[in-house]
Image (cartoon, grey):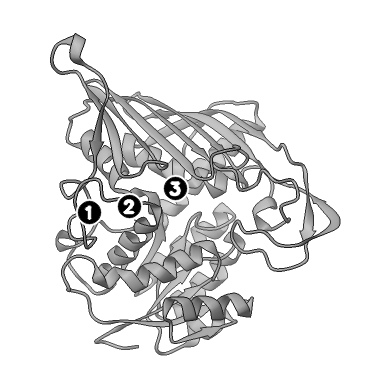
């Protein structure tokens, strides 16, 4: 592997795979030019047309149809693994054994045992392994965290989160791996893994969950006639298979400081293609952020006469996390959204791989151990739902 440049490859050319591929292309253009040269080497996918199209679109040198080709390639230093959860372990362990740095999509794997094995491999590897919880890079969410950690909002009383999507509302949407795997592997794992991580990112350690409830409202789906990529559509047959996991999930939680929280996630929320909403309530005030309006937050503080109090709209700009130096125009009210989170994530990973000190870098990506913790939290929610909403203690 090269010592004066960084060769990058992405395994998976679906929706999130393209986000990773595009992010590596853009990441070196952010902030100061302190990274070694980045070489965009390969995009791999078993569906060759998708691999080829993504490689051409994002300027990668080649495409492959086997992840093993990427793992064995001497010109690849960094690998993003962006495929079905059940495939993560084999690919990640092989990449680490081959001396690659690995950025893996969330959730870490499809079982806790598999995730723990991956974490063990990462802890023994000479290279860096990280998991991508992209939403922590949203400037608005990062600013909510600053408001909590700086004490502006005071002690956190409770946090509310909803992640509503509608990608699965069509009953003729093709069966894919997203609809298989049993309770807790559907909406909870897909989008709930984002939210559960953010609940701790904002409110601190979670000690227990309860009130778990799942619902599957579309109980069967037709088999596809073509390849299924991301949340995209394809022609389907008249043969149906049962949906094995959850379209909707909800639970509540208790923080170590005694605070509380509620979470609600859905993949069948008509009219909300991608609506993540977070609201933090503290002793001194509250703040909220909505993915549908990502360039602003709303902030309420217990200041001034009561007749003048109320939420105020704060437009995000160069005084807020990530923005200054991250865009050609980095001033307030110039829009940005979820795609930029992948760029900040890639930049942070490339900085860590390059050996840039953490004090001079973006905040590091989450470790595989944190990925395991997130899966233990989701498993506790699944057990709560199986036990009629019982309270389950989180035990790492």
Q: Is residue 116 left or right of residue 236?
A: left
Alpha carbons under labels 1 and 3: distance apart:
29 Å
Percent position of residue 73, x then y:
46, 88
**As drawn, 310 above or below 75:** above
Between residues 396 and 201, which one lies in front from this camera angle? 201
Q: Residue at x 83, y 53 (%)?
A: 240
Task: Please say whether residue 396 is visible from this viewpoint.
Answer: no
The vertical placement of 38 against 300, above or below, is below
Circle 1 residue: 323
Q: Quadrant of the N terminus?
A: bottom left
Closer to the N terminus: mark 1 or mark 3?
1
Q: Is residue 76 left or right of residue 272?
A: left
What secondary structure is marked by label 2? loop
Give the numbered dot on residue 336.
Answer: 2
x then y, percent, for residue 32: 15, 69
Q: Which mark is residue 373?
A: 3
């Amino acid at each position: 592997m090269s010592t004066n440049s960084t060769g990058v490859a992405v395994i998976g050319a679906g929706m999130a795979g393209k986000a990773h591929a595009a992010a590596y292309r853009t990441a070196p253009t952010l902030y100061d030019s302190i990274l070694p040269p980045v070489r965009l080497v390969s995009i791999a996918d078993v569906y060759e047309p998708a691999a080829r199209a993504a490689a051409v679109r994002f300027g990668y040198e080649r495409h492959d149809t086997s992840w093993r080709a990427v793992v064995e390639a001497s010109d690849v230093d960094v690998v993003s693994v962006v495929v079905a959860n059940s495939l993560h372990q084999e690919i990640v362990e092989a990449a680490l054994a081959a001396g690659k740095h690995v950025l893996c999509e969330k959730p870490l794997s499809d079982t806790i045992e598999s995730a723990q094995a991956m974490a063990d491999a990462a802890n023994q590897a000479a290279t860096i392994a990280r998991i991508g919880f992209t939403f922590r890079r949203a400037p608005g969410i990062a600013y909510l965290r600053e408001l909590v950690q700086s004490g502006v909002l005071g002690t956190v009383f409770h946090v509310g989160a909803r992640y509503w999507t509608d990608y699965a509302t069509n009953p003729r949407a093709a069966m894919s791996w997203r609809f298989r795997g049993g309770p807790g592997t559907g909406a909870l794992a897909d989008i709930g893994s984002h939210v559960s991580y953010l609940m701790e990112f904002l409110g601190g350690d979670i000690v227990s969950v309860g009130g778990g409830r799942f619902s599957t409202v579309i109980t069967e789906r037709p088999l596809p006639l073509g390849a299924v990529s991301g949340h995209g559509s394809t022609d389907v047959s008249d043969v149906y298979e049962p949906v094995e996991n959850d379209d909707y999930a909800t639970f509540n939680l208790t923080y170590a400081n005694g605070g509380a929280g509620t979470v609600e996630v859905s993949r069948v929320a008509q009219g909300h293609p991608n609506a993540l909403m977070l609201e933090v309530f503290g002793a001194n005030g509250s703040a909220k952020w909505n993915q549908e309006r990502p360039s602003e937050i709303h902030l309420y503080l217990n200041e001034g006469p009561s007749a003048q109090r109320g939420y105020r709209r704060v437009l995000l700009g160069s005084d807020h996390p990530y923005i200054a130096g991250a865009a050609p125009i980095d001033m307030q009210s110039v829009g940005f959204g979820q795609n930029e989170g992948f760029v900040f994530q890639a930049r942070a990973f490339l900085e860590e791989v390059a050996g840039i000190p953490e004090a001079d870098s973006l905040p590091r990506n989450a470790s595989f151990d944190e990925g395991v913790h997130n899966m233990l939290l989701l498993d506790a929610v699944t057990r709560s739902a199986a036990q009629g909403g019982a309270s389950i203690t989180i035990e790492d």
